[in-house]
Amino acid sequence: MRILVTNDDGIHADGLSVCEAIARSLSDDVWTVAPESDQSGVAHSLSLNDPLRLRDVGPQRFAVLGTPTDCVIMALKHILPSPPDLIISGVNRGQNVAEDVTYSGTVAAAMEGTILGVPSIALSQAYGPGARENIHWDCARQHAPVLVRKVLDIGIEPGTLININFPNCAPQDVAGTRVTTQGQRDANFLRIEARADGRSIPYYWIGFTRGQYALGHGTDLEALSEKHISLTPLRLNLTDEPNVTRFAAHF
C-alpha cells in the first residue's frame, strides 16, 4: 500500500513526523509532500497567481511552496510514480471540529485527495489553553494506526473523507472512539486586534477569544470534551437537499 502524507503546519511540523510514523506503521511505501511553511487556515485554496516551488528534502520527502491542496495535486500529478492508495493529512496541531473544518488546510488536503479519487483521512490532535508547546502527540501516535486500519477495512465511500480528532489527554486516558456529527458553536469567537508598526501605520491580526458554547449531543465537540476520539465522515457534496425541495416549489 502506497501512502501519501501531507499537512498544513508545514514540512518541519512535529505533527508531520507523527503522521509519518503512523503511516510507516501501516506501510513501507510512504511519501511525504508538505508545505514549505505553515499554511494553517488556508482552507481549500489553490495557488493560481504564484508558481509552485518544489524542494527535495529527503528520500521520498518533498516541500512545496504552496498550500496543502497544491501539495496533493503536485504529489499525484507530478511527484509520485503512481497514485497512492491512501492519503493521510496531519497530524494537525490543534483540533479541527465544528466550523473549523471550513478553514482547515488539513481537512482541505483530504478533500482534494477525495476529489482526485484517493481514500483520504484527516488527523488532528487537540490541546488545551496555554498548552501549545505541551501537546499529547502520543495520543494520536498510539491510537491512529488501529483506527486507520479499521476505517480501511470498513471502506471509505467515493465523495467522502474521514475527519479524526484526538482528545487533549494522554493515550491511556482516552475513553474510547465515537462516530460523530460535525458540531456547531453557537457563537463566533474571532476578533480583530489593531496594532501599529514602527512608523505608526496600523495593521491588524485576526485572533481568537475563548467563550462558552453548547457542545451538541453526538457531535465532535462533545466527544473531545469527554476524552473520546471523534471520527466524523464528511461529504464533498454540500447540497442542502431538504432546501432543494423547498426552493424548487417556488421556482
Image: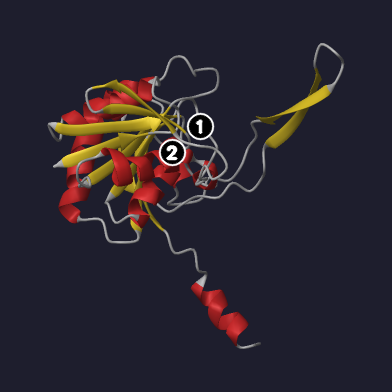
Q: Is residue 77 left or right of residue 218?
A: left
Residue beneath the point at 43% across and 54% down? 181
The quadrant in which the C terminus is found is bottom right
Where residue 201 sits in the image (x, y, percent)? 85, 21
Where residue 175 sits in the image (x, y, percent)? 31, 35
Q: Quadrant of residue 54?
A: top left
Amino acid carrying mark 1 in the image: Gln
* Residue 242 numbered tag: none
Residue 215 visible within the image: yes
Q: Which residue is mark 1?
A: 39
Q: Residues within 10 Å of mark 1 (few under 14, many from 20)?
A: many
Q: Which residue is mark 2?
A: 68
| Extreme residue in the right direction | 200
Residue beneath the point at 18% across and 46% down? 150
Marks 2,1: beta carbons within 8 A: yes
Q: Residues within 10 Å of mark 2 (few under 14, many from 20)?
A: many
Residue 151, above or below 194: below
| Extreme residue in the top direction | 198
Where residue 51 sits in the image (x, y, percent)? 50, 37
| Extreme residue in the front direction | 51
The secondary element bearing badge 1 is classed as: loop
Q: Is residue 171 left or right of residue 209?
A: left
Q: Quadrant of residue 250?
A: bottom right
Amino acid carrying mark 2 in the image: Pro
The quadrant in which the N terminus is found is top left
Residue 185, above or below 210: below
The secondary element bearing badge 2 is classed as: helix
Where residue 71 sits in the image (x, y, percent)? 39, 38
Q: Is residue 228 left or right of residue 247?
A: left
Spatial separation of the CA atoms under disc 2 and disc 1: 7 Å
